[in-house]
Image: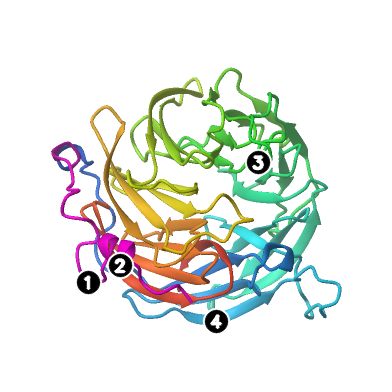
Amino acid sequence: MPPPPSRRTVLLATAGSTPFSAAIAPSATAATHASASAAPRGPSPVQYAYVGSRTTKQRNARGAGITVWRVGPGQDAWELLQTVPADDGDPATPTPTGAIPVNPSFLTLNPEGTRLYAVHGDATSVSAFAVDLSHGTLTLLNTVDAGRGNPVHLTLDPTGNWLVVAFLAVPGSVATLPVRADGSLGTVADVLELPGTPGPHKTAQLGPNPHHVVFDPTGRWLAIPDRGLDRVFVAALDTTTGALTLNAPGGAQTRELEGPRHIAFHPHRPLAYVINELRSTVHTYRWNAEAGTLTPLQLIASTEPSMTEDTRAAEIAVSPGGGHVFVSNRSGAGDSTPGGPDPDTIGVFAIERHGGLKPVGWVSTQGIRPRFFGLEPSGQRLFAANEVTDTIVGYALAGDGRRLRPLGILAETGSPTSIVWRAAH
């Protein structure tokens, strides 16, 4: 459970009221130049949420595996439907029958919502599941040992024939696995080694550390933020063979010690936004989809100006209408520190005419270490996963994300690290 509210929590967010200080108002530029393309209207549909977790004692984790939830259209508590058990990595603990490997930490669904894929953090495995269309529950198809350490993110290519996985353990790399006709995974088809000189951080930059893999809106290019090399790479996928090729010099080098972690593309403007973990900053880039190149435009802190303590940024997303960027900030100096005692924050930034960002405000996550947050498909709500305090907290979006109205704690589950959604039938 989250810690008691602090003075900072009350100042930043109060359920049922405007979550930002009145002194931090939306800019006129943001209001005037927010996209006319709004998020889908009407209430959110009933849907299923799939939540990944960490499970090992090495990570001080409390997760049980992958949990499946029924999510209603309002702010009612989520209903737990299934737990797919995962190993906790402790030889002294009995392994549950049918358990998948440790730490099913990040998940992705295919566009049809019929298959789900999971990476197993700190291990070398990737798993595939069939999704029951009537009940939303999961059945394991297979698990593949990719032979690379600590897979942390994954994405399907637009054809649905290839799963692309980022492996964080030094020397980090990106690999492709074929998706078979039944949705199961084949063995690794190609591995992309990332070149460059490690940054100066003594523990977090010992070599290549790709932390995210995502296709640009055209589906032609793959963006790969690398925490260890202070660089964002751009690559192309051969959809016939699964081979990956770097688009040199398509990537972007950051300042040292930035530690690029995740990237989010604007839905209809040639812009990309990168959250940098180690300095807790956000980079704005001009994106050339024809050439596959990133040009830096702006660098701004992800935290509120009053933040003077250690912090690590984590997640980033662009609002459905394209008017705002959201980021999450985690207190502490990495996973080996407890974070807190105050709850962490989600920052909201207005996208200005030139594409750069202007702070709107910060809202409490009502918990500690929001490794992940994400927008549900309707674009009406945002959910933050507090890994240390074992909660999922909801927010309703208003004004294209200009305001996040807290909905409270909607689910309690051990060490949540990612969420994906599909509509209920």
- Residue 338 vs 188, above or below: the answer is below
Residue 23 in magenta stretch: yes
Identify the secondary structure beneath mark 1: loop
**Residue 132, visible in the rendered structure:** no
Q: Mark 1 points at which residue?
A: 16
Q: Are marks 2 and 1 in contact (CB under 8 Å)?
A: yes
Residue at x-position 59% and y-position 41%: 213
Q: Distance between the residues labelled 3 and 1?
A: 39 Å
Residue at x-position 49% and y-position 36%: 216
Tell me which label, 4 or 2, sits earlier in the chain: 4
The residue under label 2 is which amino acid type? Pro
The residue under label 1 is which amino acid type? Gly
Residue 339 percent across, percent down from the top left: 52, 59
Identify the secondary structure beneath mark 4: strand
Residue at x-position 54% and y-position 23%: 253
Q: Name the residue under label 2.
A: 406
Residue 185 percent across, percent down from the top left: 74, 54
- Dominant secondary structure of the residues highlighted in magenta in the image: loop
Q: How far apart are marks 4 and 1 (CA)?
A: 29 Å
Q: Distance between the residues labelled 2 and 1?
A: 7 Å
Residue at x-position 59% and y-position 48%: 155
Q: Mark 3 points at which residue?
A: 204
Identify the secondary structure beneath mark 2: strand
Tell me which label, 3 or 1, sits earlier in the chain: 1
Foreground: 11 or 215?
11
Residue 133 in magenta stretch: no
The residue under label 4 is which amino acid type? Leu
Q: Give the range drawn in magenta.
A: 1-30
Q: Tell me the tag on residue 81.
A: 4
